[in-house]
Amino acid sequence: MIWGVIQFPGSCDERDALHACTLASGEARMIWHEERDLGGVDGVVVPGGFSYGDYLRAGAVARFSPAMEAVAEHAAAGKPVLGICNGFQVLCEAGLLPGALLRNENLRFVCRQVDLLDGQETLSIPAKHGEGRYYAPEETLDALEANGQVAYRYAPGQNPNGSLRDIAGVRNEAGNVLGLMPHPEHAVDPLTGSTDGLKVFGQLAERA
Amino acid sequence: MKARVLIRPKEGILDPQGKAVERALPALGFEGIGHVRVGRLVELEAEDPQRLAELCEKLLANPLIEDYEIQTL
């Protein structure tokens, strides 16, 4: 499986994402945001950072880039798309995932290791963001839960940003588009305390 | 035509920025001010003001979380 990582001006986690994809499946390449062609990659990562300076709203401008048009087609074809942090915000702004990410409830930038529940096991993954409070209207939240679209929740007592129903990550109805605020690409080497991040890449690859 | 777009958090959505401002007020001697909500103001000049609503829906506001109001001047 070949992953492509989209690089926007202002991205800052694209190199870690590239490294993580390479560890997870052997091959990955960077895709500049002005590319309209994804070059035949099997999966796409929309990485973390501050795309286009996050002016206006996080992810609001990045969604109009040529590469994002290609990502929307890739997603519609049922192929894997993973949005991490700012990438999650971009996918929500683009309408590829339901909901929105708002300023953290306590207005502070959070940077810490969190435990994520994915339904079966607990993953230890770092979170670092200022706008990670997941929001969707109540009826949307109910539908997400009913359809099994809540991919990850913060473990009880660890919600770092006031996300509704402790939601850390959601997937689309088809299951091939996944977004989460914590950073699996920073948890791929025992040197930094956890390799659980690799499971996130594996789980999405399996589903799609 | 000059226009002004006011963008504010939707009713019912927690606005921590507004809350932080509200909490700071008593220390400065401003009593009796509540329900503070902080939004954004965009000023622009448009050749075709008919399209401003579309512009708001697509870019200036996120209709899921924000309300907008267009004032042509």
Image (spheres, rainbow, N blue to C red):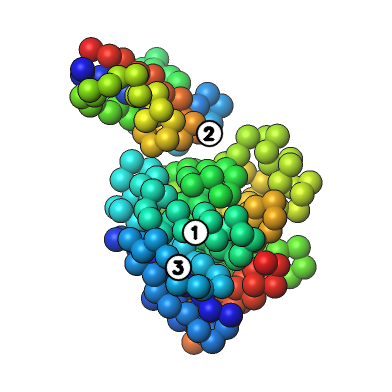
Front-most of residues A134 and A171: A171
In which chain is the residue bearing label 3? A
Q: Nearer the viewer, mark 2 or mark 1?
A: 1
Residue B9 visible to an observer of this rendering: no
- Spatial CA distance of label 3 from label 2 is 30 Å
In which chain is the residue bearing label 2? B
- Spatial CA distance of label 1 from label 3 is 8 Å
Q: How far across and down, in percent of the image, does residue A188 sit?
A: 53, 81
Q: Quadrant of residue A13?
A: bottom left
Pointer 1 with pointer 3, Cβ within 8 A: yes
For the residue marked with disc 3, what is the amino acid?
Leu
Above or below for A128 versus A41: above
In which chain is the residue bearing label 1? A
Q: Quickly name the residue at label 1.
A: A71
For mark 3, give the secondary structure.
Answer: loop
Q: How far across and down, in percent of the image, does residue A22 sit?
A: 50, 83
Do marks 1 and 3 share a subunit?
yes
Q: Which mark is residue B64?
A: 2
Front-most of residues A200 and B29: A200
Residue A126 placement, left or right of A177? left
For mark 2, give the secondary structure.
Answer: loop
Q: Quickly name the residue at label 3.
A: A38
Residue A202 placement, left or right of A105? right
